[in-house]
Image (cartoon, rainbow, N blue to C red):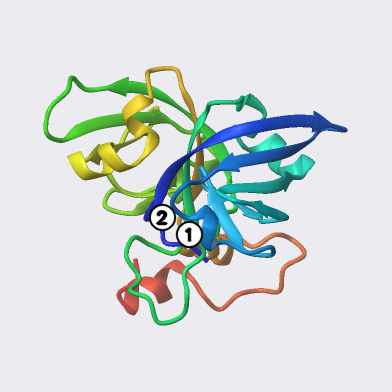
């Protein structure tokens, strides 16, 4: 489990593909030396397992399903990536609950002129629109952000100077693609309110959620 608070911006050192899967070597000067084989690390929001540690370099394998759902296929040597290790029990929980399971790829369609706070607007694939709400949480390339506005195209977020300086967002330009993970709570609520034909009938209704202050 992650919280979307980026520990460092690393860099893709080596990337190779075979059978629609990827082998990935990441340069991580800050966290690399503290990682061990088997650790979970979110790379631009994708939860991957450390397979080998060589100094400050971490090796990972990216499966076909992850390649299809994320931006990983477009990475190349030199690509900056946001890195976060899984949270340890007892640590403060900043951000929000992030699983590192990318739902879809979004596209930056607007970036306001530079100011102390910069507003980014992302296009969101239609099937995922019900899971995004104003003042709700979303992970963009693994960064925990608060939705400031829901638009017809997707959603907007406000990026404060600290976040801009300590993530790869500073290098993001219009047209760039990003990994998106919607709030896990929104997924469960949606499934409860929209059960499949095979699902047992749920007692959780819109009226029940409203009555108890959840809707």
- Kindly identify which residue carries mark 2: 4
Residue 125 in view (yes/no): no
> What is the number of the mark on residue 37?
none
Q: Tell me: 53 left or right of 208.
A: right
Image height check: is 102 above or below 151? below
**View extreme (front): residue:** 55
Q: Tell me: 180 left or right of 91.
A: right
Question: Residue 141, how many percent across, how many down?
Answer: 47, 41
- Kindly identify which residue carries mark 1: 98
Question: Residue 101, how many percent across, how many down?
Answer: 60, 53
N-terminal label among 2 and 1: 2
**Residue at point 40%, 47% (across, down):** 8
The image quadrant that residue 94 belongs to is bottom left
The image quadrant that residue 212 belongs to is bottom left
Residue nearer the viewer, 118 or 109: 118
Disc 2/disc 1 C-alpha distance (Å): 6 Å
Question: Residue 194, how many percent across, how many down?
Answer: 58, 59
Q: Tell me: 133 left or right of 124.
A: left
User: Does dot 2 land on a helix, a strand or a loop?
Assistant: loop
**Residue at point 33%, 54% (across, down):** 136
**View extreme (left): residue:** 116
User: Does dot 1 land on a helix, a strand or a loop?
Assistant: loop
Characterize the local packing of mark 1: few (<14), some (14-19) or many (20 or more) Cα atoms within 10 angstroms: many
Q: Are marks 2 and 1 in contact (CB under 8 Å)?
A: yes
Image height check: is 130 above or below 209? above
**Residue at point 26%, 38% (across, down):** 165
Residue nearer the viewer, 185 or 30: 30
Residue 163 in view (yes/no): yes
Question: Residue 62, how many percent across, how many down?
Answer: 72, 44
């Amino acid at each position: 489990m992650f919280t979307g608070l980026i520990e460092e911006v690393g860099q893709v050192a080596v990337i190779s593909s075979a059978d629609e899967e990827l082998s990935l070597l990441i340069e991580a000067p800050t966290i690399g030396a503290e990682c061990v084989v088997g650790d979970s690390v979110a790379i631009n929001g994708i939860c991957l397992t450390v397979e080998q540690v060589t100094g400050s370099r971490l090796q990972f394998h990216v499966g076909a399903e992850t390649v299809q759902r994320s931006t990983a296929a477009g990475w190349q040597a030199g690509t900056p990536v946001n890195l976060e290790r899984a949270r340890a029990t007892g640590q403060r929980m900043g951000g929000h609950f992030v699983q590192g399971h990318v739902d879809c790829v979004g596209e930056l369609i607007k970036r306001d002129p530079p100011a102390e706070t910069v507003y980014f607007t992302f296009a969101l694939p239609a099937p995922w629109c019900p899971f995004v709400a104003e003042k709700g949480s979303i992970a963009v390339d693994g960064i925990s952000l608060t939705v400031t506005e829901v638009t017809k195209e997707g959603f907007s977020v406000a990026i404060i100077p600290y976040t801009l300086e300590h993530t790869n967002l500073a290098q993001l330009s219009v047209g760039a693609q990003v990994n998106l993970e919607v709030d896990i709570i929104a997924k469960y609520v949606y499934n409860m309110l929209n059960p499949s034909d095979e699902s047992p009938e749920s007692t959780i209704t819109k009226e029940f959620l409203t009555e108890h202050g959840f809707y």
